[in-house]
Amino acid sequence: MPELPEVKVVVLALNKYIINKKIKNLIIYKSKLFKELEPNEFIDKLKNKTIKEITNRGKHIIIKLSDNIVLLSHLRMEGKYRFFDKPSANNPHIIAKFVFDDNSELQYLDSRMFGTFHLRNWNNYDKILPISKIANEPSKINVELLFNELKKSSSPIKTKLLDQELVSGIGNIYVDEALFKAKIHPSTPAKSISIDELTNIINFVNTIMEDSFKKGGTTLFSYESLNRQIGAYQNFLQIHSDNITSCKVCGNKTRKIKVNNRGTYFCPFCQKLK
Ligand SMILES: [Zn+2]
């Protein structure tokens, strides 16, 4: 599943390939992913619009177009974009195809079909769901406010850090990596984390995700950014991998457990439960 660094890599690639292009046509092959409106309404609203700006809010991709239109895209498990500079054969997992007025095209592929598209406008997109509930990214989070929220919860710190309404964009891989670096057991009750520990965790999250973004994201399972550009961060993971069996800090055996049903890697020696 793409995490925040991977989504940012996709946003960067989309900016490179489709900014300022005008949509000549949108062809929708599987309408299930297009939410709230009929597929025809998506097509009508997006036709002849020009791509003005592509950013992200958490793991949502925000595509601003001319005439006040905003298209929200979330890749979920397996969503990916492929850009072609001329008309090209459809991939078997194609969901939709944006054809631009220079005949280049952007295919959206999704073998699991969990991805979503929503249509909004520039004035309301961040005031209503799904964007309105997305918290700030770790680099913009107010640690003190987050600390006050964590004080109210006995849930594992890992679970709280994955809650997109508290802090957005930290996924299963990077939370394990950051907790390992901060030497915090992933099952530690959120309310027993000190402000210094939390500051430390968020700092590690930021440096790890920044580093991963620079390396093109982490490739696990079938994540790929545009045009099969494979990320390289998986080669730098310190703990979150079946291939890492002994701790890179102390040399002891690492463990894999479930925390709130998410596969979790940690070192029982470096990350002792309080
Ligand atoms: Zn260790």
Image (spheres, rainbow, N blue to C red):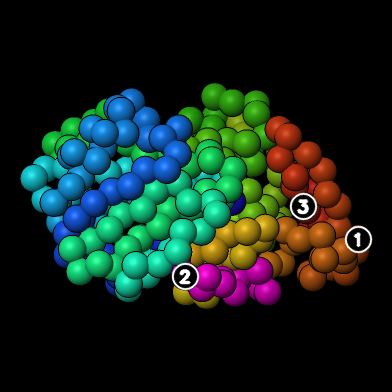
Question: Residue at (59%, 26%) from the top-left corner?
Answer: 153
Give the magenta-colored segment's residue range. 226-236
Looking at the image, residue 126 sits to the left or right of residue 229; the answer is left
Give 164 or 226, whichever is nearer the viewer: 226
Looking at the image, residue 117 sits to the left or right of residue 254; the answer is left
Instruction: Confirm or deny contact between disc 3 and disc 1 (CB under 8 A).
Output: no
Q: Residue 168's x, y, as percent?
A: 45, 44
Upstream in sequence: badge 3 or badge 2: 2
Mark 3 C-beta closer than 8 Å to ligand 1: no
Mark 2 C-beta closer than 8 Å to ligand 1: no
Upstream in sequence: badge 2 or badge 1: 2
Q: Is residue 22 visible?
A: yes
Element under disc 2:
helix
Task: State whether residue 236 is above or below residue 159.
Answer: below
Disc 2: which residue: 227
Upstream in sequence: badge 3 or badge 1: 1
Element under disc 3:
strand
On whether residue 221 falls in the magenta region, the answer is no
Q: Quadrant of residue 8?
A: bottom left
Disc 1: which residue: 253
